[in-house]
Amino acid sequence: MATTASVRPPLLRQGSEKASLLCKPKQRASVRRRSFTARASSNPVSIPKQWYNLVADLPVKPPPPLHPQTHQPLNPSDLSPLFPDELIRQEVTEERFIDIPEEVAEVYKLWRPTPLIRARRLEKLLGTPAKIYYKYEGTSPAGSHKPNTAVPQAWYNAAAGVRSVVTETGAGQWGSALSFASSLFGLTCEVWQVRASYDQKPYRRLMMETWGATVHPSPSAATESGRRILERDPASPGSLGIAISEAVEVAARDADTKYCLGSVLNHVLLHQTVIGEECLEQLAAAGDVPDVVIGCTGGGSNFGGLVFPFMREKLAGRMSPAFKAVEPAACPTLTKGVYAYDFGDTAGLTPLMKMHTLGHGFVPDPIHAGGLRYHGMAPLISHVYELGFMEAIAIQQTECFDAALKFARTEGIIPAPEPTHAIAAAIREAMECKRTGEKKVILMAMCGHGHFDLASYEKYLRGDMVDLSHSDEKLQEALAAVPKI
């Protein structure tokens, strides 16, 4: 695996001047950072006017990202080959709230606010005294939570004069969201989709193409990173780390192209907090306070988006829920990974981030929850996990699909494979309440529907789905390649 400076494209500028990006950057006159007017009063919940930044309220700030060549703290300006200035500012800021631009808020109105639903029929099936709520993000045009950040990322790029954006996608939810958002703001969009999901989910690819995107299976022959992987393993199922390498390589070499990321980074989790901010208001209207908040985790955007506003309330002493992240047993980043500086991609092109990692060379088995097949975890989520503010568990995919059928046959929604992990954990929690008689309030993130994942359901219903786990030998090999910082 090549990670030396000699094989990296000029992604990050060594010795670049430290930009004053912690201050508000200059932008084109068309960019307005104003609050918007909420929906009509007939709606019981208003769309948030601001995104929330958890970093502002943490007693210990997270470690900084490092330059991949110098191993020194990254200057914000080092990120300019990849991101527009406003997204870099959001990545590094410690401001508590960031105003949502009016143009972004107008697009949010296509599907926000999203519903908070009490799962009464599931409660009845389980015979539990617990209350189960789920925040359903499947009402967005792309069918998941991903447009919450795709829309602002596309808008900030368009406002900065960028013409093209590139990205990676696993199951296709993020690629679909960015394709949709790019079509609204006149951007060309190119997507590298993990090969395993590209083959499993052809309709996700068609969805992206319908919105005008070009989609490549990853690893591909279109990039140096992809060609190196294919030389070693022509049948590689790919991974999010590999797909990120390919997209970042293209962004770094094309001056009018920027990179968009669907998870992991601070500004992505920031945008997703519209989920939790709405949910706080909705639960208050229902007269309930959660005892436990549950979400699936791959890179962390869905989990952080729901949890961070509730974590703020807990840090302020206004409530005291437990927070549980649920990951696939085949890619157990939080439960089996190490907390260390590592690359966010397989080829070693990105900055080094302090996160829980299985090693940037780790390629998970091709489970059906393609959006959770990432070797690392969002640095901010990794940090709060290290602070002891949350828990993590790993669940096998057959238990998750069993839970999904219970959910679909009571609540009527067929979940995407990713949130089936949260459903399985919520059912475990509810059954424990049945045993103890506790009347807990359980809140879970239902981050998207599974209408394009029915081949996975077919495999489970036919009895062909098997549980996949990580190889200890493969894991140790990948961990050995983690940089020693």
Image (spheres, helix red, strand yellow):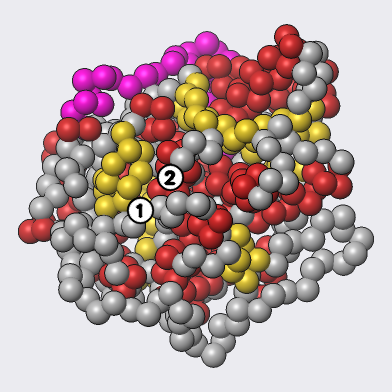
Disc 2 target residue: 383
The correct choice, above or below, for 209 with respect to 31 in the image is above
From the viewer's side, name the closer residue of 202 and 57: 57
Outermost residue toward the left in this view: 6
Counting residues from the start of the chain, the first of labels 1 and 2 encountered is: 1
Q: In which quarter of the image is residue 248?
A: bottom left
User: Dots 1 and 2: beta carbons under 8 Å?
Assistant: yes
Residue type, numbered disc 1: Pro
Instruction: Give the residue at x 62% y 47%.
Output: 315
Instruction: Give the residue at x 44% y 71%.
Output: 89
Q: How many labels does the image show?
A: 2
The correct choice, above or below, for 217 with respect to 429 in the image is below
Disc 1 target residue: 63
Q: Which stretch is magenta? A: 451-478
From the viewer's side, name the closer residue of 380 and 44: 380
Please tell me whether mark 1 sits on a helix, a strand or a loop. Answer: loop
Residue 29 image position (x, y, % from top left): 54, 90
Residue 447 image position (x, y, % from top left): 62, 41
Residue type, numbered disc 2: His
Instruction: Give the residue at x 19% y 47%.
Output: 485
Q: In the image, is 436 to the left or to the right of 392? A: right
Residue 281 image position (x, y, % from top left): 79, 51
Please tell me whether mark 2 sits on a helix, a strand or a loop. Answer: helix
From the viewer's side, name the closer residue of 71 and 480: 71
Q: Specify few, some or many for label 1: CA neighbours under 10 Å numbering under 14, 14-19, or 20 or more.
A: some
**Is 467 one of the magenta-colored residues?**
yes
Residue 165 image position (x, y, % from top left): 40, 66
From the viewer's side, name the closer residue of 478 and 442: 442
Q: What is the number of the mark on residue 473? A: none
As measured in the structure, the alpha-carbon distance from the residue carrying label 1 to the one carrying label 2 is: 8 Å
